[in-house]
Image (tube, rainbow, N blue to C red):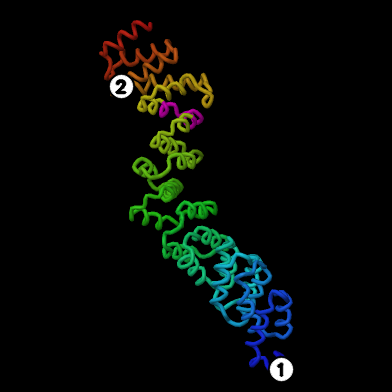
Amino acid sequence: MLDHNMAQNLQIVVQVAIKYSELLGPQNIIEIFEDLRCNEGLYYYLGSVVNVSNDPAVVFKYIQAAVTTGQLKEVERIVRDNNHYDAEKVKNYLKETALPDQLPLIIVCDRFDYVHDLVLYLYSNSMTKYIEVYVQQVNPSRLPQVVGALLDVDCDEHVIKSLISSTPVQFSIGDLVDEIEKRNRLKILHRWLEAKASEGSQDPGLYNALAKIYIDSNYEPERFLSSNKLYDPRVIGAYSEKRDPSLAFLAYSQGQCDDELLRLTSENGMFKQQSRYLIKRRDLGLWSKALVGDEQHPLNQSHRRQLVDQVANYGLPEADDPEEVSVSVKAFMAANMPQELIELLERIILEPTAFSNNNNLQNLLILTA
């Protein structure tokens, strides 16, 4: 019937094919339509069975038929809603076909995490407008991966900055920072991050990124680390350790990251800073870690000696808070360090300090001696 008059008999043939589909099997019917090069008939036939079929081959044939007959909206629908097609095969087919509209390919790559492959394909074929469509209209949450892929193909920074600025902030700023940072290009986010901060963003990832930029560019990092409360002190402290231990100390002290701070100051010989921090913290448990040690902080006699010297020479003589002095003295008593305690008391009492005339400390010195 199709050989005799395809246009006139197409509807009847399709109805017969649908009626006997289960009996003949979809593959046999597909072969008949293909042998006759009847793409329209194949499209209409498969349209009746594709939504109830679990066969990836049937779905793929339907996608091919829809493409061949120009039914791109139906291609979009099936790749968006159907769960029974071979994503890799469909992706490659859509790339090879070079459709006038790349939305079906975008949908497949977004659903099945072929984002990097998608961006490389679109960029290499000068279809950057579809990259914009993807992150601005289809799925803004994919922006971090898209930017990472664009950096991999050495896309112009102005293009990337424009894409970031024009995309709704429905993505993880932390993920965006990670993608850019691992490619050593964090500075391209500088102005955008500052703009988001000025808008009142509370995202720690944003402020972590700003802190890293200020540290690497030496753009008043001390001011930022001491005044900003929204970055993660542990993240920025760890980032700063090899770059500038003093900045790491500042970050750790802002967040009261005690364990990290003790390790940092001991490893870098920063015992003056350690002594001042311990005195200000007024925490007997923390003092014990420094003076006695524990499993996480094994006692190092050399480090303890250097700490005691700094406490005696600078830390306590500078103190003007009675509670700071009281807790420090109790810490040395609890650590069973009478000789070192005498050193401290002598510096506090016998030299001009705010506590030179403190009767309790004088009596304690007499008893300890």
In the rendered view, does 267 fall on the left or right side of 9?
left
**Which numbered circle lies on residue 4?**
1
What span is colored magenta in the figure? 263-274
Q: Residue at x 30, y 10 (%)?
A: 362
- Is residue 39 visible in this depiction of the protein? no
**Tag 2: amino acid:** Glu
The residue at which mark 2 appears reads as: 323
Q: Is residue 42 above or below residue 163?
A: below
In the rendered view, does 23 fall on the left or right side of 322?
right
Q: Is residue 251 above or below residue 289?
A: below
Q: Residue at x 37, y 56 (%)?
A: 196
> Depth check: 109 or 150 in front?
109
Q: Nearer the viewer, mark 2 or mark 1?
A: 1
* Element on which disc 1 rests: helix
Label 2: how many Cα within 10 Å (few below 14, some 14–19, many 20+): few
In the rendered view, does 176 fall on the left or right side of 67?
left
**Which numbered circle lies on residue 64?**
none
The CA distance from mark 2 to mark 1 is 104 Å
